[in-house]
Amino acid sequence: MVHHEAHAKGSHLTESLFSTEEIEAGRLLFAQESRFLLGVASLKQLPDDALPEIAFAGRSNVGKSTLLNALTGRKALARTSNTPGRTQQLNFFDLGGRLTLVDMPGYGYAKAPKAEVAAWTRLVRDYLRGRVGLRRLCLLIDARHGLKPTDREIMSLLEESAVVFQIVLTKTDKCKNLPKLIAETEKAISEYRAGAPLVLATSSRQNRGVPELRAELAKLALDEALQ
């Protein structure tokens, strides 16, 4: 079932959408100990999903690992590489016993062997369709390039799987016309019931949008803690 949180759709000033208290709650959550749990190459290896899970997906080299490190304030929580396709499994991280972060394999890397790409695709599809604890998927989009056909394919898969996804723009410090990109992305999201309307613009290098993303994700952990 798709769940939506109320957002001010169309607002480009994401900072104004979060209160000081929400920003602080996000800071405190992500300041807790974060540790690597395990890497999963098959569904049989999946850990229990007692905690709410937030998955991070995106095209190869979009900056998933860098963003995870920025969120948690850890330089090497998730391995980063200039070589596309480095993450070849689902990597699970525990955040203070309140949230599980999942670093997913990058997609759209044409040079990977076809059999390997097919195996990654099956793993990701099966994970998305059968993971009860998955509360949201952050779909990372490189702000220099915008949405690509492969991103649309993933969005359709998430729609079919009834998984709420949220677009997170990365590398926005290198984007020449960010307001236009955000408007175009919001329009694209409106076509999907599973798409959360808020587009978050981030730059790990400048720490832009990172506090706001923490605040947004902390809402999911807090909701679980209160149930």
Image (cartoon, rainbow, N blue to C red):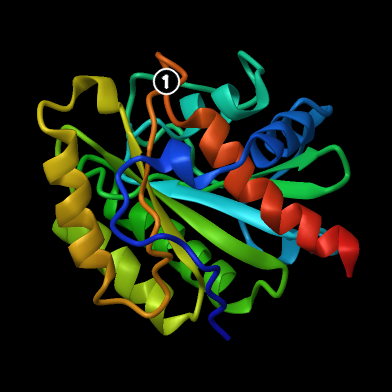
Q: Looking at the rendering, in which quadrant would you find the C terminus?
A: bottom right
In this view, the residue in front, 196 or 13, is 13
In terms of image quadrants, where is residue 53?
Answer: bottom right
The picture places residue 199, in percent across and down from the top left corner, at 36, 51
Q: Which residue matches tag 1? A: 81
Three-letter amino acid code of the residue under disc 1: Ser
Instruction: Kindly state the secondary structure of the residue where label 1 is placed.
Output: loop
State whether residue 72 is above or below residue 130.
above
Q: Looking at the rendering, in which quadrant would you find the N terminus?
A: bottom right
Left/right placement of residue 216 relative to residue 201 reads right
The picture places residue 101, in percent across and down from the top left corner, at 66, 45
In terms of image quadrants, where is residue 158?
Answer: bottom left
Q: Residue at x 21, y 55 (%)?
A: 185
Left/right placement of residue 61 relative to residue 1 reads left
In this view, the residue in front, 97 or 5, is 5
State whether residue 118 is above or below residue 32.
below
Left/right placement of residue 75 relative to residue 188 reads right
Q: Is residue 12 visible?
A: yes
In terms of image quadrants, where is residue 177?
Answer: top left
